[in-house]
Amino acid sequence: MKIETKIFGHRGYPAKFAENSLEGFEYALENGADGIEFDVHLTKDQVPVVMHDEKINRTTDGKGNIKDYTHEELQQFHLENGETIPDLKDVFELIEKHDALANLEFKTDKYEYQGIEEIVLNMAKEYEFKHPLIYSSFNLQTMLRCLAIDKDLDCNWLVDKKISDPKKVVVDNGLSGIHPDKYHDFDGVQRIWTIDNEHEAEKLMMKNVSGIFTNDFVKMNELRERLRCESEQ
């Protein structure tokens, strides 16, 4: 059995570096992650920046919502490694230099940032990535708006609940797949989050799921290599 599951560095490599930091992304891209996953918001003046939470409180030395700061104002705050909050363009520049996948999550489940889909997709056109970007969101309407702009985009619905008929959801909405927090028994693309337990990861890899998102891609790479060697014996 050939194990093809792709391993994505969830928010970079937070087991070792500040989450959603350029330092973490660069390490993952240069040290064997199949891809990286990151989250995008808009500042008050509609500049796309990369952070998981809507608020900057947890991962920076500042407080408040991203949407309430201009891009210039956000630059006064720092991640735990001293970096400023990454701009999306900086992450795109990193991805462009590497032969790796990238999953961009639109963080629109709490705030529907006006025009974020068009802003991000237009920016993506300025780069020559080795692979098409993978897009995801908990907000299905965000994915539908992206597909209305370009029906050929790789758009995936993020879900934290069981879907009774995932294939129908994917087909009816023109999606490429789903990104669930638990395995779904269906013949289609599913990338599962956030998998840090090796026993759980092994079961998913043996099912050959499309991908997993993990906070420790190094550990998961080692597991996949071991399973591949065992399967060849």
Image (tube, rainbow, N blue to C red):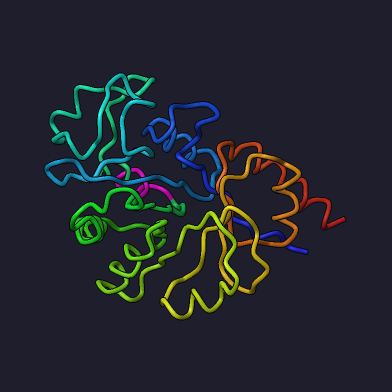
Query: In the figure, residue 174 lies in which quadrant?
Result: bottom left
Name the quarter where the C terminus is drawn: bottom right
Q: Is residue 22 left or right of residue 29?
A: left
- Residue pushed farthest right? 233
First to last magenta residue range: 92-98
Chief secondary structure of the magenta portion: helix
Q: Position of residue 79 (x, y in %)?
A: 34, 24
Where 9 sits versus 18, above or below? below
Q: Nearer the viewer, residue 8 or 74?
A: 74
What residue do we see at 60% from left, 71% from top? 164
Q: Is residue 149 left or right of residue 164?
A: left
Q: Residue at x 72, y 41 (%)?
A: 198
Q: Taking 148 as reference, is 200 above or below it?
A: above
Q: Is residue 224 or residue 71 the one in the foreground? A: 71
Q: Is residue 95 magenta?
A: yes
Q: In which quadrant of the rendered view does residue 205 lie? A: bottom right
Residue 203 on image: x %, y %: 75, 53
The percent coordinates of residue 110 (x first, y second) are 33, 48
In the displayed structure image, the side of residue 205 where residue 79 appears, left or right: left
Q: Quadrant of the N terminus?
A: bottom right
